[in-house]
Every structure is written in C-alpha cells, then in structure tokens.
Amino acid sequence: MKFRTLAPSKPILASLAIAALTLSACGGQGGNQAADNATGEGEGATETAAGGGDSQLSGDVMVDGSSTVFPISEAMAEEFMKENNDVRVTVGVSGSGGGFKKFCAGETDISNASRPIKPSEIEACQENGIEFVELPIAFDGISVTVNPQNDWASCLTVDELKTIWEPQAEGQITNWSQVRGEFPDQELSLYGPGTDSGTFDYFTEAIVGEDGASRGDYTASEDDNVLVQGVANEAGAMGYFGYAYFEENEDKLKALEVDGGDGCVGPSRQTIADGTYQPLARPIFFYVKKDSLENKPQVRAFAQYQLNTANNTYISEVGYIPLPETLYQKAQSRLEAGTTGTMFEGGTTVGVNLSEEL
C-alpha cells in the first residue's frame, strides 16, 4: 500500500488541507475502474469505483474525516468493493474536525477521527438529529520527526516538546539552542497538522496540557504528506504526524524518542501496541451514523468489514497497529447493539484505558 500525494502545502495555521486524489481500485471479479475526484476549498475526497464480486449490496458509502485514519479506510474500501460489485465507497480527507462538521450536518455516513468526538460536535449532531455509534479501529503513535541530518537530538522530554510547541513559544523559540543548551545554533522550523486535525488536538493536550493550545507560527496542513516533505527537506525541521506516515517515509525521516517520565521511548509497532510509547500512543476511531446503519445495508456491511479481525492485515499494511481481538469483539458488540453516544465524556483519550471504556 502506498500513500498518494495529496494537496500542496498551506504554510499557515488553521489551514485545512485539501485532499484530492484519484484512487484506482484493485482487481476482483468483473474488474474495477479508476474513479475521479475534485478539489474544492476546504474539502476533498477519494471516490473509489465499485469493484467485482457477486454481493447483493448496492449503493454509496460516504466517508470523510481524519487524514490519519484515511489509509485504513482507503485499504478497506478497496478490498470491500472487490466483494461488492455495486457498492461505491467515497473516502474524503477533511481532518477529524472537518469530518465531524459534515457528519453532524448529515452529509456523510461515516466519520473517521484520530480523537474522540468533542462535546460541541455532539451538540451539533443532536441539533440535526444525528445519532452515532463510536468504534475504535486501531492504535497509532504520533511520531515526532526531524531531518536525518539532525545528529544532535535523539530524545526530547515532554517539557522540551512543550517549550517548542506551547503558545508562548510563538516568535520566541526559533533555534534548537533554545531547546537545550547543548544543541547547536540551528534554526528550528516546524511542521504540524492544522486545527481541524484530531492529531493536533491530541498532541496539544498530551504535550502542552490543553486541547488546542499551540503556537501558530508553523507550517500547518491536514495533508500529512506535506508535513513529511517539509521535514525531509530542511536540516533544522521538526514535525509530528501519525506513525503510518513516518513508517512509510522512514528512509528520509528520523523519529525522536520521547521521555514521558519513564525514560526515552521511540515510536514502533511494539511500543505503540504495548502502550510504552507515552504519552503519544492512542486509539483511532470511526463513527457511523445510526440512521445509515439501520437503512443502508452497504454502510452496515462496510462497518462490519472494518471490524472483522480477518481484515486486520489491511491495518498492518498501512502502518497502524490492530487492536487486540478482545477489543474488536467488544467493538463488534457495540456495533450490532447500535450503542449510541461516546465513551469519552471528556473528549480525550489521553491516559484512558480503552478496554475499560468499551
């Protein structure tokens, strides 16, 4: 699985990256065909053509939201449509926040998210009569990366990361020597997700201590590939994004270890799975509209497909870590029971035990 290059960079905070790409669906009986898509201000979508198979399912499945979760949806959609000849799955990338805006307006069936739905978003859904089922899909570890030419930093403490990213750092912390005295006189350039990103929300809460609290003078994009290229091309750069994008570009990035109080730990499949990569290991989600579950069989089937442990390999292939089987069983039960609402009343998964919440 390869990630597609998305929209060009927007070097401002609060920019919403426009993800637009063409995805060619893979083989299957009857064959698949490439689908087109369009780029629009503030939104984008991967429209995937229907594939082969002899299923009786038909119709559309509209998905949007997190760029972190996007590779999973993309992979699942490709394989799902091989088995369902007349189903068309469209996967958009608007960031977790942008996806919830569409979801709560009734525009999509499924909203991908790299953090739990916020109280304000729940309120927006309620105003429009949208009920939802919240489902975890995998584990991720937000990876703090630097350019491979950076030979001075291998591990940063949470306090040092806070020094770099907190609002008070804006226009003040611009050189690596200000982060730690032994670091060189090297300009510090920063890359990170925009404010509609769930990764932004999680990182600011876990590192700065407050959801949404961040300096604004960095290159922001909802397109993780833009962030990867920025870090890869500047010797003094630092960026953060989902683990899959680091693993996919490991040859041109260097991941820093993070000391969350128990020593330095780097992001890896093992440290994310066992929870030792703290505080940046986290679950990621998708949300399904209850009305779509009840009235659109293709949406229910696609949701079930994503939680089927037989399909875990697609999660691993795109660089994320499948949940333990027991958690998938709990998520499947939640889906089949149509359990609505969020498990995370505080709107955060920082320090939360997912098994206990499910």
Image (cartoon, grey):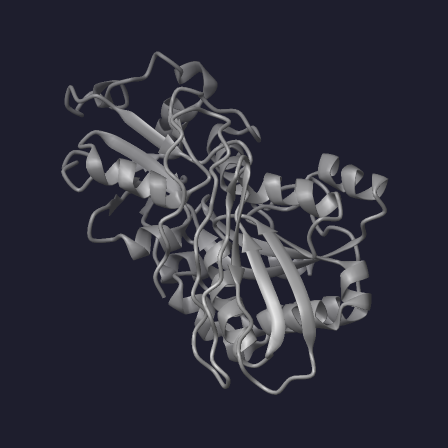
In which quadrant of the rendered view does residue 135 lie? bottom right
In this picture, residue 252 sits left or right of residue 291: left
Q: On the picture, is 57 further left or further right than 315?
A: right
Q: How many marks?
A: 0
Image x and y of residue 69, in percent: 51, 54
Q: Is residue 330 visible?
A: no
Q: Residue at x 45, y 36 (%)?
A: 193
Q: Is residue 65 left or right of residue 233?
A: right
Which one is nearer the viewer's eye here, 24 or 344? 24
Q: Please name whichever residue, 184 or 43, is drawn nearer the observer in this view of the structure.
A: 43
- Report the quarter where the C terminus lies: bottom right
Q: What x and y, as percent, mark residue 237?
A: 25, 31
- Residue 79, how many percent across, how many down? 50, 74
Q: Where is residue 281 drawn, in percent x and y?
A: 46, 50
Instruction: In this rendered view, identify the residue nearer to me: 59 or 164.
Output: 59
User: Could you tell me if residue 333 is visible in this image?
Assistant: yes
